[in-house]
């Protein structure tokens, strides 16, 4: 059975690049604008995974995106790209601030710890950046872990410690990100495993949530031991 992925469109021109790549990887994709569905509606659709798209605004202006992060079944995989990544951070208590300078349409070396969606990829990898806002490292809540960064310490990737939740500041769907297909394929592979977990337990079963955390750990590769820049260590320790 095909994986069903629901994409929240934050009114961005890149959204359908994401949709196309997910479809090429075998997913059945459904798209809703961020003001055409709410968090309860996302749960009612019962997708195998949810993607929050890039967008031109801030998390506070991204429609249902922040609520989706907070209210989604903790066993349902979630990927946020660019604005979606920032929405995940904001929803869980981090601050989103203006970066040192806007970066739009530039390939950039991204360093990472080899976990989650980035397992098996070289570090640094080349990725396309299109943003002026960033997540502030010192504001990260305990549940969020930095998994990717630039040489000067800007956060380029986050993952939740206990849920299948991933944020990427860079664009995996961009032609400037050669390994983008691999990254999205990893997300779909984790979504497939988590679907099996959800089908085996009721939505309110605390045991299922604990099992989900264990399954996520099994689905992800262990860190390769790289050390974060000093300013980002709080998000990894």
Image: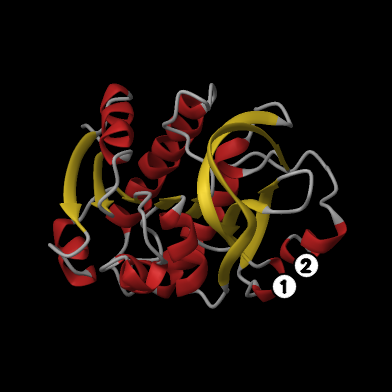
Q: Quadrant of residue 109?
A: top right
Q: How far apart are the two marked residues, 2 and 1, measured between alpha carbons? A: 7 Å
What colour-coding does the image apply? Answer: secondary structure
Mark 1 nearby-residue class (10 Å; few <14, some 14–19, many ≥20): few
Q: Quadrant of the C terminus?
A: bottom right
Determine if residue 168 is in view.
Answer: no
Callout 2 touching callout 1 (CB < 8 Å) = yes
Left or right: 124 in relation to 34? right
Q: Looking at this view, is 182 or 59 the one in front? A: 59
Mark 2 nearby-residue class (10 Å; few <14, some 14–19, many ≥20): some
Q: Position of residue 97 (x, y in %)?
A: 58, 68
Residue 161 sits above or below residue 81 on the image: below
- On residue 153, the disc is none
Q: Looking at this view, is 100 or 169 the one in front? A: 100
Sequence-wise, the earlier of marks 2 and 1 is 1
Q: Position of residue 140 (x, y in %)?
A: 64, 71
Left or right: 124 in relation to 94? right
Kind of element beneath mark 1: helix
Q: Residue at x 70, y 66 (%)?
A: 137
Residue 151 sits above or below residue 74 on the image: above
Q: Position of residue 54 (x, y in %)?
A: 38, 49
Q: Which residue is mark 1?
A: 138
Nearer to us of marks 2 and 1 is 1
Q: Position of residue 15 (x, y in %)?
A: 29, 41
Q: Residue at x 39, y 60 (%)?
A: 75
Q: Quadrant of residue 65?
A: bottom left
Left or right: 203 in relation to 91? left
Q: Which residue is mark 2?
A: 234
Q: Quadrant of residue 129?
A: top right
Q: Looking at this view, is 217 or 123 the one in front? A: 123
Q: Quadrant of the N terminus?
A: top left
């Amino acid at each position: 059975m095909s994986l069903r992925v629901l994409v929240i469109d934050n009114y961005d021109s890149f959204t359908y690049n994401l949709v196309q790549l997910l479809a090429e990887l075998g997913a059945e994709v459904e798209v809703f604008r961020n003001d055409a569905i709410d968090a309860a509606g996302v749960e009612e659709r019962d997708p195998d995974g949810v993607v929050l798209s890039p967008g031109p605004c801030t998390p506070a202006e991204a429609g249902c995106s922040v609520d989706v992060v907070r209210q989604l079944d903790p066993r349902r995989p979630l990927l946020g790209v660019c604005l979606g990544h920032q929405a995940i951070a904001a929803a869980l208590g981090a601050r989103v601030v203006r970066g040192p300078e806007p970066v739009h349409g530039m390939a950039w070396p991204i360093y990472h710890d080899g976990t989650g969606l980035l397992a098996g990829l070289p570090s640094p990898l080349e990725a396309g950046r299109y943003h002026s806002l960033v997540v502030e490292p010192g504001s990260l809540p305990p549940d969020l872990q930095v998994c990717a960064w630039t040489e000067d310490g800007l956060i380029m990737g986050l993952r939740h410690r206990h849920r299948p939740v991933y944020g990427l500041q860079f664009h995996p769907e961009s032609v400037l990100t050669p390994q983008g297909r691999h990254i999205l394929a990893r997300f779909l592979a984790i979504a497939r495993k988590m679907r099996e977990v959800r089908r085996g337990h009721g939505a309110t079963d605390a045991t299922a949530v604990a099992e989900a955390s264990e399954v996520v750990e099994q689905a992800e590769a262990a860190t390769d031991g790289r050390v974060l820049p000093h300013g980002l260590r709080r998000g990894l320790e």
